Every structure is written in structure tokens, then in C-alpha cells.
Amino acid sequence: MTARTLNLDALRSFVAIHETGSFRLAAARVNLSPSAVSLQIGKLEEMLGHRLLDRNARRVALTEQGERLLLQARSILALSDETMAMFRTPTLEGRLTLAAPHDLGMSLVPALLRRVAERYPRVHVDVRLGASGDVLDSFVGGQSNVVLFNDVGPPAIASRRIRSEPLAWVMARGGRAHAEPVLPLATAEQGCAWRDAALSALGASGRRYRVAYSSDTAMGQMAALRADLAVAALPVSLAQGDLVAVPAADGLPELPMTEIRIAHDDAAVARAVAAMAEEQAESAAPMPRAG
């Protein structure tokens, strides 16, 4: 039996459909007509023997088999792109400043810098980490060329979402801080989207609270949680090990989704680095969901 090979263009269209939510937008991204993209997906489904997409009037969603393919497709495309890059002459060069809050500076930026160095060895990236408000101010003021930031609700500046997950009320496993009559909170300083979301939700619900611990990093807030000094509104992916989500029975108000967003000044070097950040976020493992 002759082995059949997955079509990279079809996989790229499949990923684009998932990210844009429609055949029309995906077709524009991959520079094909919607009918050509539809034909690609039909052949892909025929080859794999499974329906990959659920189509309705509002949005295209992945089936269970589509979810399985998505992880593989992203890995295959990333490997293909990296392989092609190995044999291209790295013509892009220059220097830029990347600004990010401390948490993203620890979690996302190091891997991004490694990928930039591998693909564009003539590009030099200066990194500036700071409080969320300072990070945004640096971009608006022209002191940084690329900015990564966390946001909740409408973005503070024109930007692209590259990752999202729910915020959750997080506490120490077996802790008692969540049961105090006046809820002790661990938050960042003013200007943090997670802080604003937490205080807004508590204020709207009428739940009494006090800011018991402040830190500009999630790591600092998590230290307070582990000591059972407070609870915090943090991405649900951080509720693991010795940290857990506050039980729903406590009646704490619902929190919104948090997004990692990126903006750049549209220079060629900045566009390239921003594109690599998006690739990195898309190829990462799915973030856990609450519930």
C-alpha cells in the first residue's frame, strides 16, 4: 500500500480556519479563494476518514477529530517553517526593543528570543520588563518596537490576541484565606488588567475585600497564596499543584477571560519578531479551561 502524504497547504488552511472562525477569512489569509480552501478541507477529511469541522451560520468549529489534528498540524507546520528557514539566507537584520510585563518576560520571552536568534541571527533584541502600565506607555511613547501584554476586555491599544484563557480565583490547597469575612487579595499594582478585573467583579457583587499583598508579578502573588495570606485572580493554568481554584460554593463572582496580546510599530524587523511570537503561542499546548 502506497503511503499517503499530508498536504502542507491544506494543513495551513485548516489552522487558518480555526484561528479566524470562517472559510472566507482563512482564504484571505492563505491567498486562496473560499472554494479552493473548501476543496482542500474536503480532500483532507477524505484522506483522514473523519469530519474535521462543524459548520454553522455563525462560525466554524473543530470536531473532536479536528481538535486532534490541530495539535499535529501546528507541529508539522512549525517544523516545516523552521526547516525552510535553515536553508534561507538570513537577510533580515537590525535592532529592536521588546517590552513585556515581568510574568511574560519569564514565561514567553525566553523561548521567543531563542527562536529569533536561530532564524534571524542578525536581529538584536533588547528586552525591557516592567509593570503592565509602564510597558504600554513605553510602546505608545515610541520607546519600544514590540510589546507583549496581558489584557481583559477591550484592548488598551491596537493589537492582536495570540493566546487566551479564563481568569480564576486561586488559593492555597487546603487554605483558609478564602473563608475570611473580608476577603484578602493578592494583586499587582494599579494598571494591571487582572487587578482591575478582580476589583470590578468584587465591587459589582458587593463582596467585601481588602488588598493584603501587592506584587507586580504573578510569582509574587502566588507566594502570598502559598502562605495562605490571600486569594488572587490569576489565569486558571496557574491553579495546579499546591494552588487550586476557590470552590464555586464560596460564591465569588465570575471572572472574564484574559488575553496575551501583541503590538508592533510595523517596521520589518518588528513584524518578523511579532509573527514569531504568534507562531510560538499558537504551537504551545492548549491552556486548561475552568470547570
Image (cartoon, rainbow, N blue to C red):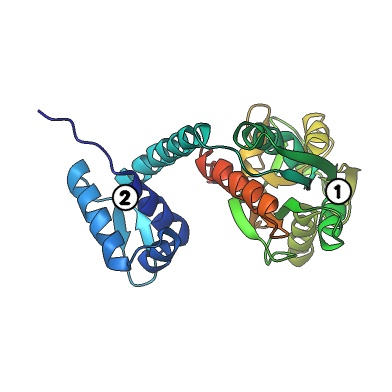
Left or right of 189, for residue 90: left
User: How far from the left and from the top, in percent, is residue 240?
Assistant: 63, 32
**Residue closest to the eye, 124 or 13:** 124
Please determine whether, in this image, residue 282 is positioned above or below residue 223.
below
Left or right of 246, for residue 71: left
Distance from label 1 to label 2 (Cα)?
A: 41 Å
User: How far from the left and from the top, in percent, is residue 34?
Assistant: 32, 67
- In terms of image quadrants, where is residue 72? top left
Left or right of 161, for residue 1: left
SS for tag 1?
loop
**Residue closest to the eye, 2 or 52:** 2
Residue found farthest to the left: 1
Residue found farthest to the bottom: 57
Q: Residues within 10 Å of mark 1 (few under 14, many from 20)?
A: many
Q: Are marks 1 and 2 in contact (CB under 8 Å)?
A: no
The residue shown at (89%, 44%) is 214
User: How far from the left and from the top, in percent, is residue 179?
Assistant: 76, 43
The kind of residue on which mark 1 rests is Ala
**Residue closest to the eye, 102 or 26:** 26
The kind of residue on which mark 2 rests is Ala
Which residue in the structure is indicated by mark 2? 10
In this rendering, which labeled residue sits more in front, label 1 or label 2? 2
Residue 104 visible to the viewer: yes
The residue shown at (89%, 49%) is 211
Q: Residues within 10 Å of mark 2 (few under 14, many from 20)?
A: many
User: How far from the left and from the top, in percent, is residue 77?
Assistant: 42, 40
Query: Considering the image in quadrants, where does the N terminus appear?
Result: top left
Which residue in the structure is indicated by mark 1? 131
Disc 1 or 2, which lies upstream in sequence? 2
- In terms of image quadrants, where is residue 8? top left
